Amino acid sequence: MAYYIFVAGGVMSSVGKGAATASIGKILQGKGFRVSAIKIDPYINVDAGTMNPIEHGETFVTNDGTECDQDVGNYERFLNINLSTDNYMTTGRIYQAVIQKERNLEFNGRCVEVVPDIPNEVISRIEKVAKKDKADFVMIEIGGTVGEYQNLLFLEAARMMKLKYPKKVLFTLVTYLPTIKTIGEMKTKPTQTSSRLLNEAGIQPDFILGRASVPLDEPRKRKISIFCNLDPKDVISAPDVDSIYEIPINYEREGLGDRILKKLKLRAKTRDMEEWDKMVDTIKKEKKDIRIGIVGKYFESGEFSLTDSYISVIEAVKHAAWANNRNPDIHWLSAQKFETGDKNELSKLKEYDGIIVPGGFGTRGTEGKIKVIEYCRKNKIPFLGLCLGLQLATIEFARNVCGIKDATSREFDANAKNPVIDLMEEQKDLMKKHNYGGTMRLGTWDCKINKGTNSFKAYKSELVSERHRHRYEVNNDYRDLLVSKGLVIGGINEKKDLVEIIELKDHPFFVAVQFHPELKSRPLVPHPLFKEFIKAAGNKKPEA
Ligand code: GLN
């Protein structure tokens, strides 16, 4: 029988509920428990696949091809587990399932109601995860902020879950404590109000995690304790940190893990955070920088949104840098700046140890990225292309090495004469029917690695499986020509005969992949391709 810990957020969004949820899971893992996690998103979208990354951040993809919220990525990275469609819920998904059951006469002719039928569907899905993942603990993060309309039904589900399992459910409220500069005092009132709003939903928080720029002091903890009706020991200080991977260590310092076990009358099976602690020590240690440029779009929305849109790529770079005993120094390079092929602009690329062209959709910025790729190819700058990055590297090679001047992707030109990147047949039908949601090539696909390549050197394996999310592919009609001109096929999917990796010879590291290796990188298990890329970048001579 599992225990359930719900995590809700108060005061405002972006307080770091995802990292908090993952971190609580991590400390429970450290005490020897099996942990799983669920993200609940209150929006109507059935999944995160149809949402713009500027608005919602990166779309994370699980092994089974679920397009979900980036927090699921946080859970996988912290807990080093693989999650699936069951670990993700949205209002849209829940309603869709309940309505389908009604159509199937599964409610035996009775009136189907918002309460309790919607919360019951939520509860049964949570129980399913506990069973399927054989979890001792299921962490459940409720998206949104308490007090808004959107997530009310999920709070209702949490309340009903406590009624069902009174001794097995805990609630955590993550809030924010602002410090007004001119007064210099950290204010607890918004936290008090949020806690009351949670009370209104019938829930008393067992823990309050107080996010703030600095640690909470004793008077603040006491005040929250009195007004929010909980022991001061259960008010946990959660100050800003340099690296999110420090959070579990901070929580442990505050005694959160033992407080959880005490409330549930459980005993730790082990006490082992050694590997994690060691990793965090490496992060904090003085190290030589590795300068990585990521060429992307979404720049107009600011640094915060950029980090959100490319979070898995950034984390994968960090993991690999730490594994190479380097300090990741990531720079954003706007693709549009390179569009005109301005030599001055392009020569600045030499300042970086390595360049990444990540995934993306649509035409904007692609010509600039192609110019960057050409520069990296010719100037031997270590290069890693991800998904769209592979497609653009193929186009660049076709245009500038094979002499197909109008080579392009069908995505950018529906009437392309030379679509070296093209839609697969089954995708054509889907697009005609406007059937866009959840219909890309998604989830894990096998990739057979060719020996003697950089990819083989990285993976040290002939068969790997990686996660995908794209519609377009290298057009096999051009494959022989590309290869005859020197393009190396690093790996293919044998079943469908699809190009999955391309590389260049006579280059320190030029690898582009049709999949998203960043989605599988974990701080304790950095991705082999990123590790090899950073290694090559580390060997680049300054201003090579
Ligand atoms: N837009 C490209 C496609 O759909 C690449 C997608 C991606 O980079 N994830 O195939």
Image: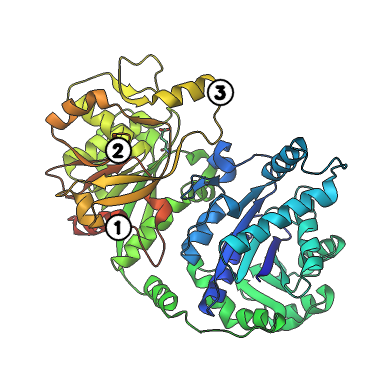
Task: Give the Cα separation between the discs numbered 2 and 3.
Answer: 40 Å
Is residue 493 at least partly visible in the picture?
A: yes
3 with respect to 305 (left or right): right
Q: How many residues crowd around disc 2 within 10 Å: few (fewer than 14), some, or many (20 or more)?
A: few
Q: Which residue is mark 2?
A: 345
- Of residue 153 and residue 362, the one placed in the foreground of this image is 153
Three-letter amino acid code at the position of disc 2 = Glu
Residue labelled with disc 1: 528
Which circle's residue, 1 or 2, is located before the other in the chain? Answer: 2
Q: Amino acid at mark 3?
A: His
Alpha-carbon span between mark 1 and mark 2: 31 Å
Taking the image as shown, residue 52 lies to the left or right of residue 526, namely right
Labelled pair 3, 1 in contact (Cβ < 8 Å): no
Indicate which label's residue lies in the foreground, 1 or 2: 1
Query: How many circles with numbers are drawn on the protein?
Result: 3
x 47%, y 79%: residue? 273
